[in-house]
Amino acid sequence: MKAEDLTLYRVRIPRKSCPLSDIPAKVKSEFGKLQDRIHPGMRVAIACGSRGVNNIALIARSLAECLKAHGAEPFVIPAMGSHGGGTAEGQAKVLADYGITEEYVGAPILSSMEVVSLGHTPEPPHVPVYMDRNAYEADGVIVINRVKAHTDFHGEHESGIVKMLTIGLGKRAQATAIHSYGVRGLREYIPYVSAAVIRSGKIIGALAVLEDGNDDTADIAAARAEEIFDVDSAFLARSKSLMATLPFRDLDLLLVDAMGKDISGTGLDTNVIGRMSIEGQPDGEPHCRCICVLSLTPGSHGNAVGVGLADIISRRLRDEMDLDATYTNVVTSGFLKRGAIPYTAPSDRDAVETALKFCCAEDPDHPRFVRIPDTLHLGEIVVSESLLSELPSDCEILGKTVLSFDSKGQITAFQSR
């Protein structure tokens, strides 16, 4: 079947939307929970990660303004494990691409991969504990991170401020130590390490960020150091209730226009595509017989970790990959299958048509097909006619569309028919 012959429909999927109207005011209000721990002349590290958190630059600037208003001297550090190619320069660039610059935030950016050892967790297996040297040498640290479901495991604490205290603040050294234990390290040992980091006395608190189904900032909550575990757990539950997912249990082909680190830590959010590709970890829904991905976001800086979750990719994506950055992240994570390069088709068109040929549809002329821009933005998707009857009643069918390609075989934007 030719890609253009598919009968497709653009569909709007309602998402739970509850955006904050005034982010700086919310940060200022929440800062009130921390201000008694801020004293004139304190050097305070603001830790920011690499997950593409919406409004992260504005949140960081608002926090820096609050700190300065109380006489502190804030600076920003990247808290992102091995991302940015595992280099200080690369991590500073990741922050800059999110708008976190000295000029915008009003505070210096201090990026280093050096860490200080804080000993080991008292709980077996006695995991080594590290902290970014700039953070350790500060008078206190406030971490900022979005709280959401993790892409490797599920537990009481997943991707959020508890994880930031460990793999973020501990840089590549901590990421390597945790990931060496596989999923068990993520689920069970991250809380041990985070508790040890809090006991160091360096953590003032955190700003937990919640995003709604449209990727808008829905809430921000400050947590004092001793409150971090409770706030993280509560925000995780709220995040899962707002998370955007696909409304299908079974697909022949899922076509993803772009993957990337600014979309998900695994490039493709496993909670959306239904695949884990980690031995011993069950897959979720939807069950996708074939996943085809066409490009890598510029914000990934060539890091295509998670590419192994796909079955077929376009040459365009392969050419956008930086193998050093990708493999640094893959090796640190310990999940090597996720870095395996899938079958690579010469063009987007060839990738889609190869996927259609091998997706093993029960009815090859009417495959169960979905196209999404990426795994983060699911407000409007494209579905095949065979899926229309399974759409929830609150979905809106916007009209027919086709897959179209330019003269080089590169896919173009959704087209109405």
Image: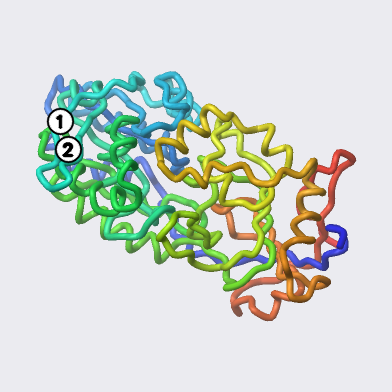
Q: Which of 35 and 44 is in front in this view?
A: 44
Q: Quadrant of the N terminus?
A: bottom right
Q: Where is residue 368 in the image (x, y as percent from the top left)?
A: 71, 70
- What SS does tag 2 mark? helix
Q: Where is residue 128 in the image (x, y as percent from the top left)?
A: 20, 35
| 139 lies above or below 262 | above
Q: Mark 2 points at which residue?
A: 197
- What SS does tag 1 mark? strand
Q: Are marks 1 and 2 in contact (CB under 8 Å)?
A: yes
The amino acid type found where label 1 is placed reads: Leu
User: Would residue 157 be seen by someone viewing this image from the given angle?
Assistant: yes
Q: Mark 1 points at which residue?
A: 118
Residue at x 48% of width, y 64% of height: 283
Q: Nearer the viewer, residue 43 or 402?
A: 402
Q: Quadrant of the C terminus?
A: bottom right
Q: How crowded is mark 2: few (under 14 residues within 10 Å), some or many (20 or more)?
A: many
Q: In this view, does 69 lie to the left or right of 23?
A: left
